[in-house]
Image (tube, coloured by chain):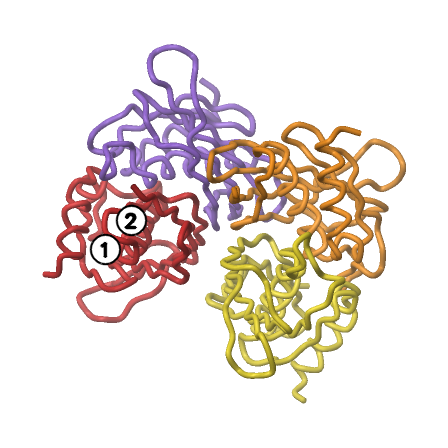
Chain colours: A purple, B red, C yellow, D orange
Amino acid sequence: MSNLHELILASFNSQGLMNTLGASLAFVGEGEVHIALPFSKHLSQQRGYVHAGAITSVVDSACGYAALTRVAAGADVVTAEFKINFMRPALGERFLAVGRVQSAGRLLSVCTGEVRAFADASAQYKVVAMMQATIVIVTG
Amino acid sequence: MSNLHELILASFNSQGLMNTLGASLAFVGEGEVHIALPFSKHLSQQRGYVHAGAITSVVDSACGYAALTRVAAGADVVTAEFKINFMRPALGERFLAVGRVQSAGRLLSVCTGEVRAFADASAQYKVVAMMQATIVIVTG
Amino acid sequence: MSNLHELILASFNSQGLMNTLGASLAFVGEGEVHIALPFSKHLSQQRGYVHAGAITSVVDSACGYAALTRVAAGADVVTAEFKINFMRPALGERFLAVGRVQSAGRLLSVCTGEVRAFADASAQYKVVAMMQATIVIVTG
Amino acid sequence: MSNLHELILASFNSQGLMNTLGASLAFVGEGEVHIALPFSKHLSQQRGYVHAGAITSVVDSACGYAALTRVAAGADVVTAEFKINFMRPALGERFLAVGRVQSAGRLLSVCTGEVRAFADASAQYKVVAMMQATIVIVTG
């Protein structure tokens, strides 16, 4: 595990909400972070699908941590805003939120994210949500 | 309690995520719905504030239910997308998400929402987040 | 005319696009700016309404100048991003874009905007679009 | 030229704004449309770059026409909303707006777009803006 992965894992583990949702850090790469979320009734909306808020929470964290992989040591990130489209019901056995840096400025980072729904253990998925986020880079 | 309030309360209570977050339905009016969220460490991000995802979840639900107050009996609503700005850290003892209908079309409803942070039991608050959402009206 | 109004008018007049669209600066107040746009066939989309891009251009400028009314002397503003909903066709004889500061931070300003369509010279209007924008404050 | 290309070209040519901005239809494919925009002082903001509104106008049209390539014959499209990030100043000799369908539903289409800035006649470019848009499909 790289230093960067360890740093992000420590931050992730200190996020009460990620633990409450049952999410886990699945991948940390240069400019890209994945977060896994298994289905649970505790995350549902009124029809039994996963609530848009839970889907949003994991992809927001994935985008934030993706941005964090590209900042200088010691800097931190804060989400200024994002926009998310929900293209189909969040139906599935498990979900994977993928956050990617699209533009890394000195002050702001622009990231995109998507959430993939898997019906079973196979690699086939459907994209249920797409995010475009603006992250502020906070230095010392 | 009005029929509309009862209908929305029943739907709200069936949302596993709202229960998981500790949120409660605080007000249902024509075109406006409030959801209350007490602070909890289970909702935190890495610095101890409430995670943007939890803030987003309650204001998304508030916007969706606000839209639901304006549709014909039997119709339902689904969030197509939203955009949310986080203006300051979600610091407080309790939060109130306020969703309001701005435009109620036949097919789409546009809502705005805000999340207010209260430091104590007084009525003074700061707005920590603002949402603009597009809700699809699903008939029959 | 206040110094602030003069400053913004000079900037507005140097925007080639505002002149190309036929827009004019209609009001400058603390945290609020209005831009007027008369209907013209030169601004149309394929059905003859005003194109979403023209509507967006004037409300983007209104938001940016609203933010500018709240920054320190010598600072400038740049639009980082915005989101805009189009609630009904932009039909009318004239339009007014209203930009307002909702939150003025040290680094970022969050503004909302709306575009009002007037069918005639009366004061009655319909809101055809709503914007939520993030503006970067550039110092030095 | 395909029937689809002809259909979209006819619609494009009827958009007064595209003509006013000096934009032209550069490519029509299945789920993807490009619009070219040469630099002009008539499109500038106060610092001489191309105004965010002009950049937005061409990528909004590119997204809408991309959506149109995927609807049934006789259906039309209307932009419900979009979000756009401006990552760097729109500096260049010419610009290309690229719109792509990401999800084509029965009712709504989700598209992404980007605007590329070219400093000269070479193929090298920088992405100056990214859009995520929701388009309504209008039938009958």
Q: How many marks?
A: 2
Q: D89 above or below C4?
A: above
Residue positioned 14% across, 46% down in the render: B10
State left or right for residue B139 relative to residue D112.
Answer: left
Secondary element at image label 1:
strand
Q: Residues within 10 Å of mark 2 (few under 14, many from 20)?
A: many
Badge 1, how many Cα within 10 Å: few under 14, some, many 20+? many
Q: Are marks 2 and 1 in contact (CB under 8 Å)?
A: yes
Q: Which residue is located at x 66 percent, y 51 percent?
A: D56
Of all residues, the one furthest to the left in this rendering is: B1
Mark 2: amino acid: Ser
Amino acid type indicated by mark 1: Ile
Question: How far, Cα to Cα, is label 2 from label 1?
Answer: 8 Å
Residue B94, percent from left and from top = 22, 57
Work out which quarter of the rendered image holds the C terminus of chain C and state it.
Answer: bottom right
Q: Which residue is mark 2?
A: B61
Task: Specify whether D15 is left or right of B47.
Answer: right
Q: Residue at x 52, y 44 (%)?
A: D138
Q: Quadrant of residue A103?
A: top right
Picture coordinates of residue A110 (x, y %)? 57, 42
Q: Check chain identity for marks 2 and 1: say if they share one.
A: yes
Q: Residue drawn 31% across and 36% down?
A: A14
Q: Is residue C30 above or below residue A5?
A: below
Looking at the rendering, which quadrant does residue C77 occupy?
bottom right
The residue tagged with tag 2: helix, strand or loop?
helix
Circle number at residue B35: 1
Q: At which x and y percent is residue A136? A: 52, 48
In the rendered view, tell whether residue A75 sits above or below residue B119.
above
Please tell me which of labels 2 and 1 falls first in the chain: 1
Residue B48 can be seen, yes or no: no
